[in-house]
Amino acid sequence: MENRPLFKSGHTACAGCGQAIAARLVIEAAGENTIIANNTGCLEVFTTGFPESAWGVPWIHSLFENAAAVASGVEAALKYLGKKDTVNVIAQAGDGGTADIGLQALSGMLERGHDVLYVCYDNEAYENTGIQRSGLTPYGANTTTSPPGTVSIGNIHPKKPMIDIVLAHGIPYVATSSAGFPRDIQRKVKKAISIKGPKYIQIHVPCPLGWRHESGKTLDVAKLAVETGLYPLVEYENGVLVSKRQIVPKPVEEYLKVQGRFKHILKNPEELKKVQEIANNNIEKYGLKVQTQ
Amino acid sequence: MKQFLEGSRVVAEIVKLCKPGVISAYPITPQTHIVEELAKMVADGELVSQFINVESEHSAASVVLGAVATGVRVFTATSSQGLLLMGEVIFNISGMRMPVVLTCANRAISAPINIWNDQQDSMALRDSGWIQIYAENNQEAADFHLIAYRIAEDKSVMLPVMVCMDGFILTHGMEAIDMPEQGQVDKFLPPYNPLYKLDPAEPISMGLLADPGYYMETRYAIQETLEQTLKLIPKVAGEFSSVFGRDYKDCLVEEYKTKDAEKVIVAMGSVCGTVKEVVDGLREKGKKVGLLKIITFRPFPYTRVFEALKNIPKVAVLEKAVSLGAYAPLAVELRACFFNKKKSPKVISSFVAGLGGRDITEQSIKEIFKKLNTKEIALEFIDLKPELIKDEYGE
């Protein structure tokens, strides 16, 4: 039991996988007295190919869209057994499993007030099935189902506002984080599990394969998303914004140019301007800009 | 003690005696009364259980999956579209070898939307790896839930059980029921003692990816277990009889006046009561007729059915389900049972009746006996209304 690895090496994630980095940080912050319910997706596939498992904590996978409901059942059973106060329950999924197919189960779990931390690893597409567009794919991104063409600029929809959606459920803790900021992930996970009730953390996790960036640059890419204002790091307690990572905003090109999925946007000044506007809106909405005297 | 109760109340009372730690359900007619009664019992503190109201049947099944994986006895109930919406989780629960007990209040499938009874819903899930038991009346519905928990949680089984009871006819029908005492139930059904569970003291992973090198054996294992279960069910039914005094024999089939019969109807569920009435009437007139009631439909008791019918000249399969585009599902099992066998009924005719809640009357059953002659009927719908099937849009 002492010092047992909670997320073991030897799993089959791609080199430079941001999700693998973040998932390890999450479970190490949560600790060994944790049960995980995992949706289908990259994380499930690369950690649990039978007969091996990377997980040093009890872990269950059922289907693509039901981790929030399975976690609700685990939590209810722990309550019945009188063990809930000593065991954390985490439901975790990718962005498709959270914002698209799993949104209903997630909403049910939040509304019912289960004492569960839900973690969404946001790599901004269905990477496991071959980089298809999800509801959290950013504007303009080239995916296999939102390719740019002569009459399309790629994904024409903005990211689904998941933070606003979960906040609307009135849950006690909501935060975003990023694989580029390991201490931020661990602080927020520890904070979340110290609070009773439903909690939601969405972590930006670069995917070298899907985003077409160098696998050694995962953390740099993740940091650039935050530093340009495209992925704000925010934290809400009881609906109140209690922290945000302030930035000296860099132009969005700096983030876009290190990835292949936005190559076509860089050649299109009008579209580039729209992406910059998304960042500007975030910066304004959350007050991200460092105030100088 | 005899009590005069509605079928749904009977199920709720029995489930209470089984003490599930987690109950989760989503309302659908005609399952609602079952879960309403349980919710009230929990609200009144009569039943100590976590009652989880969910946003869909998909989540109801997922909640009980998560809870039983954590080592707690669970219960859910559904019907029709609800069962179909659960479908993905239904297969997952059996694949993960989770001993869930579910009541299916049998109801027709949409479209057209129809809330009344037939058995197309549970039939659609017949290949899911669940054990399926069909009740004729509410005493059976009660007793079969007790047997269901014993079978599901047996360490040699570890598979889910669906107790099927006809919607409205049983769920909303009043009957005098011999309700067991808590002491009897505790004697028959010990607390759930899982083989494996989600426990930080002994961390295991459940629901792993099985590649082509491993997957097939998991299916083989379920098939093997289900075949073995055909031996366990009669054993458990025997124990049931010794504790509660009601004898379901092997609990696979019930033979009603079949010994010297020339014509036998094979059926499942509440219609068997009507068939018995008709059989009694025809017997009084000297006709050699009988009924074979299928209680356990999955695993299908081929050997038992063969023994029961091998000397019967004419068999009619009467069912409230279809397999659109093919022969009716129960008839397919009967014909498979006797394919290439030396001893066999000369005729196995197939009749579909009662879809979408159309009454199956004594007259319907008499008609089936009448139609059961030397010419085998591949598939015939009984009690169709000719005025509704005339070719209005034809040339």
Image: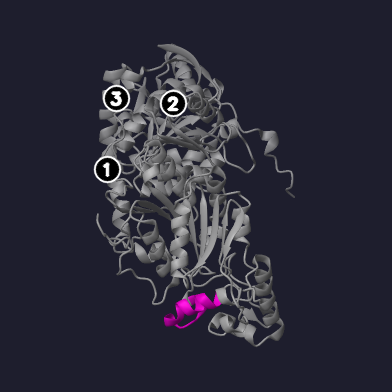
Q: Foreground: A115 or B94?
A: A115
Q: Per the image, is A217 magenta?
A: yes
Disc 1 sits on a residue from what chain?
B
Residue drawn at 44 percent across, 69 percent down: A182
Residue drawn at 56 percent across, 22 percent down: B363
Disc 3 sits on a residue from what chain?
B
Q: Per the image, is A5 magenta?
A: no
What span is colored magenta in the figure? A210-225
Report which quarter residue A80 is drawn in: top left
Which mark is drawn over residue B188? 3
Callout 1: helix, strand or loop? loop
Mark 3: amino acid? Phe
Q: CA distance from mark 3 to mark 2?
A: 19 Å
Co-location on one chain, circles 3 and 1: yes
In the rendered image, the residue lying farthest to the front is A293
In the rendered view, tell whether residue B287 sits above or below residue A168. Answer: above
In front: label 3 or label 2: 2
User: 10 Å neighbourhood of mark 1: few (<14), some, or many (≥20)?
Assistant: few
Q: CA distance from mark 2 to mark 1?
A: 25 Å
Which comes sooner in the sequence, label 3 or label 2?
2
| Quadrant (top left/top right/bottom left/bottom right) for the C terminus of chain A | bottom right
Q: Which residue is mark 1?
A: B195
Mark 2: amino acid? Leu
Q: Main secondary structure of the magenta part?
A: helix
Which mark is drawn over residue B47? 2
Mark 1: amino acid? Leu
Residue drawn at 39 percent across, 56 percent down: A30
Question: Can the viewer see residue B324?
Answer: no
User: 10 Å neighbourhood of mark 3: few (<14), some, or many (≥20)?
Assistant: some
